[in-house]
Structure formats: C-alpha cells, structure tokens
Image (cartoon, grey):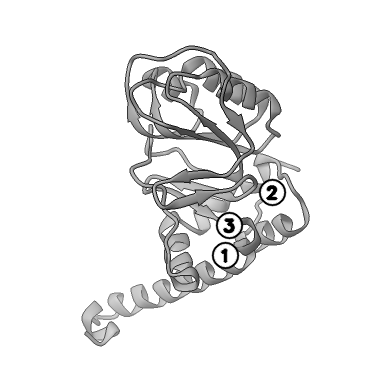
C-alpha cells in the first residue's frame, strides 16, 4: 500500500473482518480518528466493561499502536520467551507479554530493535521493561506497567499464543490491541466491527457537544445535569 494512502476506522473494521493480519501501513490514519477513550466508552456501552489493561502506559506519549495480539505468558525471570515470540509473530502484530511479576525486565533495547526489524507494530508488557532512553530513540512503541534496570535470563520457558489474564482483563491471541497516551485497550476480535461502529458514533456525539459549547451552552445544560 502507498504510505500516503489513509484508511478510515470503517475501512480497518472491514479489513479485520476478512484478514487475519494487516500491514502497519493500514493504520496510518487510525489515531487521527479514534482514541482509546472512544474505544473504552464503546466497550462499556456494549459489554459493560472497559477492557483497559491496568497500569500500562507508553514509554513516550507519542507512541500509538493498533494491531492483533501475539501473546506471551512467562515469568519475570525469563526474557527468552519474548525473544522467541518475535520470530513467530507476523508483521503488524502487537506483542503482548504478561509476566508473573515486575521485579525483572522482560523487555529492553535488544528485543525492541529485533521486533522493529521484524515489522511488529509495538509491544505491551504487563510487567517491567528497561533501556527506556534507547527504546525512545528507536521510536519503537513500548507500553509497560513499570521500569526497572535489572533483567532475568533467556530461558525461553514460557508460553506463546495463549490466553492471558491481566488484572480482570483477558487477552486472547488475535484480539485487537489499541494503545495511545492514555493507555492500552483490548477489543475482543469477534466484536471489533461492532465496537468500532459504536466508537465512531461516540466521537460524532462528542463533536456535536463541542459545537454546542462553542455556541455558548454549558456542558451541564447539554447533558441535562
């Protein structure tokens, strides 16, 4: 695809319904259209749950991701499983790592560089990472709960492409992962088209509210509070 071409959320929704993996270029305009806040509200409206990964934030505010989850379940003492997962994942995937603790980093500069060369969209770590400045300079999107200088060993004794439990959120392989400066959202793959349709409606409603505020109405008047 020409890098200058833009794909709307509606277009991405249609592509996700027919293709298992999408190239990163398909998401060029995504974050100009919808935010994790819109997605969270849509999930809450439809599922009565916001599906936010607790405590996870980007290493740099500008980092944004959207892609299918390639999952990793491992101990905080093992960064080898994440490395193995990079080789197994497809271009455009988001590597989603769930560690049992956050007392060792399971991700850093070398894994980020490897994932970037593979064409992954980004990495989410429910646990700890290190080499923050180096990752920022690479401009490879990494989202994490915490940062720590020490790491474990490349034992590669974890599991890949399995369901993960992150707080009260379940992440399944191929679920859609969306991240921006507010955090990370998981959208169940089978509900992605419905959630995006609802999120676009929410964005439209918010735009109408902003127009009314610009015309002199207060938010409490608009909402009838």
Sort mark 3 into few (<14), some (14-19) or many (20+) by Cα contacts within 10 Å: some
The numbered mark at residue 5 is: 2
Element type at mark 1:
helix
Tell me the mark number nearer the camera, choosing from 2 and 3: 3
Residue at horizontal 40%, vertical 21%? Answer: 105
Tell me the mark number nearer the camera, choosing from 1 and 2: 1
Q: Position of residue 218 (x, y in %)?
A: 22, 79
Specify which label sits upstream in the sequence, 1 or 2.
2
Q: Position of residue 154 (x, y in %)?
A: 53, 13
Q: Position of residue 10 (x, y in %)?
A: 64, 64
Indicate left or right for 215 with 118 as reference: left
* Residue 28 or residue 23, whichever sits in front: 23
Specify which label sits upstream in the sequence, 2 or 3.
2
Sort mark 1 into few (<14), some (14-19) or many (20+) by Cα contacts within 10 Å: many
- Considering only vertical position in the picture, is 124 above or below 209? above
Q: Quadrant of the C terminus?
A: bottom left
Q: Quadrant of the N terminus?
A: top right
What is the CA distance from the residue labelled 1 to the residue labelled 2?
A: 20 Å
Element type at mark 3:
loop
Q: Position of residue 91 (x, y in %)?
A: 69, 34
Asked whether disc 3 touches disc 1, contact meaning CB atoms under 8 Å apart, the reply is no
The numbered mark at residue 188 is: 3
The residue pinned by badge 1 equals 196
- Considering only vertical position in the picture, is 180 above or below 197? above
Tell me the mark number nearer the camera, choosing from 3 and 1: 3
* Residue 74 or residue 91, whichever sits in front: 74
């Amino acid at each position: 695809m020409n890098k200058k071409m833009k794909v709307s959320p509606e277009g991405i929704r249609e592509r996700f319904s027919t293709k298992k993996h999408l190239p990163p270029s398909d998401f060029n305009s995504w974050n100009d259209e919808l935010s994790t806040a819109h997605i969270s509200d849509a999930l809450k409206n439809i599922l009565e749950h916001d599906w936010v990964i607790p405590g996870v934030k980007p290493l740099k505010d500008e980092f944004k991701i959207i892609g299918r989850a390639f999952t990793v379940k491992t101990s905080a003492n093992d960064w080898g499983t994440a490395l193995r997962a990079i080789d197994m994942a497809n271009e455009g995937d988001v590597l989603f790592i769930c560690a049992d603790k956050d007392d060792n980093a399971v991700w850093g500069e070398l894994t980020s560089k490897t994932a970037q060369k593979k064409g992954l969209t980004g990495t989410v770590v429910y646990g700890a990472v290190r080499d923050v400045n180096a990752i920022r300079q690479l401009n490879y999107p990494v989202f994490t709960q915490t940062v720590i200088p020490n790491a474990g060993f490349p034992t590669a004794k974890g599991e890949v492409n399995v369901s993960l439990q992150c707080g009260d959120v379940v992440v399944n392989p191929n679920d859609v992962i969306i991240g921006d400066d507010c955090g990370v959202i998981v959208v169940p793959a089978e509900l992605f088209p419905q959630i995006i349709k609802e999120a676009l409606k929410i964005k439209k409603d918010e735009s109408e509210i902003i127009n009314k505020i610009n015309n002199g109405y207060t938010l409490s008047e608009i909402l009838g509070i």
